[in-house]
Image: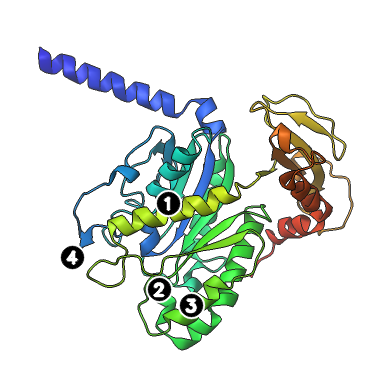
Amino acid sequence: MFALVWLILLFYSSLVSTQDLSHDDVLQGKNIVVLAGQSNMSGRGGVINDTWDGFVPPECHQNSSILRLSAGLTWEEAMEPLHRDIDVVRTCGVGPGMAFANSVLEKDPSFGVIGLVPCAVGGTNISEWRRGSVLYNQLIRRANAALQGGGVIRALLWYQGESDTVIHKDAELYKRRLMKFFDDVRSDLMSPILPVIQVALASGKGPYKEIVRKAQLETNLQNVKCVDAKGLPLEPDGLHLTTLAQVELGKMLADAFLQNVPLPVRIGNFSKKSEPMDTSKDSERINNEGDVEIKVETVDHRLPPGEKKESKSKDEKVEITHVFPPDQKPGAGNVVGEAVVKVAENFQSAKQAISGTHKTE
């Protein structure tokens, strides 16, 4: 009898958990963070001889406000190893993702639900992430799937390059390939100023680590930051970060992220639950979260930048909207507000990025 009652309670609790996780308010307000790169992003902390020791430090424990997009494109409560069904060739352990998310929430409890999108695969070089490749297409597909039901992509966390230290030519070309990758991702996600936080290598598979590190540290793109993993403890293989090193890296990533919490640029139709908005440029309204939304432009996504033509269907248009708290509205005498104005003034680059999504290479 006790066993029967226990099974009923277990079944009921699983239903409640699923219902809470799929609640509209939870999914619509999620802050999406994409995790990509190779093994030190997917996580090898605690993995020795292809076996994970199972140790999860307190900084990486589960939190009901931290979700994970599974390989099946469904949201679930996140837990280590985050990449267990994505980086499937080798055993995954602790990576920086959970420590990052927990640190963000610890330092900003009002931040809201974080939706992590694991995409990293071990042993990959930058060429395998080029536009049109399997890994690239998977990243874009998973990022777009994460947006279904609501939410905003807040950042891309990128840790990759160990495989590009083996051949001198790869190391020399790394910076150019890396910057093109960032540009392509921003273009195909229709987010021209998507914040990117990359990690400068702590280790490498070959002798050209410093060339790759230099490229990473000197990447000069808007809204691209770099945290340096040099000196963090490594596993006995001399390549992968230890569990405690991953915790430290996650905190470093969180600090870099929170130093300039990005203003979301929403591209698409307004939420059906939002108040009606004037269709003219520069019109504004208050959304359900109490943030101010100012419409910058409406464009036909099929047309080259600068070309004007009235679309026959509303489905052919996308709206570009800047979202920010009321106290950071442009003209309020603050740096963030003025930054929004600057972005709006340079909107042509956003249109170029949008048109770039329809190019093939």
At label 2, the amino acid type is Glu
Q: Nearer the viewer, mark 3 or mark 1?
A: 1
Q: Nearer the viewer, mark 2 or mark 1?
A: 1
**Relative to 293, does residue 261 appear above or below in the rendering?**
below
At label 4, the amino acid type is Asn
For label 4, the residue is 49
x then y, percent, for residue 281? 86, 40
Q: Which mark is residue 162?
A: 2
At label 3, the amino acid type is Val
Q: Nearer the viewer, mark 4 or mark 3?
A: 3
Marks 2 and 3, the one that precedes in the sequence: 2
Crowd band around label 1 with a 10 angstrom C-alpha radius: few (<14), some (14–19), many (20+): many
Q: Nearer the viewer, mark 4 or mark 1?
A: 1
Label 1 element class: helix
Left/right placement of residue 213 relative to residue 78 reads: right
Could you tell me how far apart the alpha carbons at marks 4 and 3 are, in whole angstroms?
A: 27 Å
Indicate the quadrant containing the N terminus: top left, top right, bottom left or bottom right.
top left
For label 3, the residue is 212
Marks 4 and 1, the one that precedes in the sequence: 4
**Relative to 251, does residue 282 appear above or below in the rendering?**
above
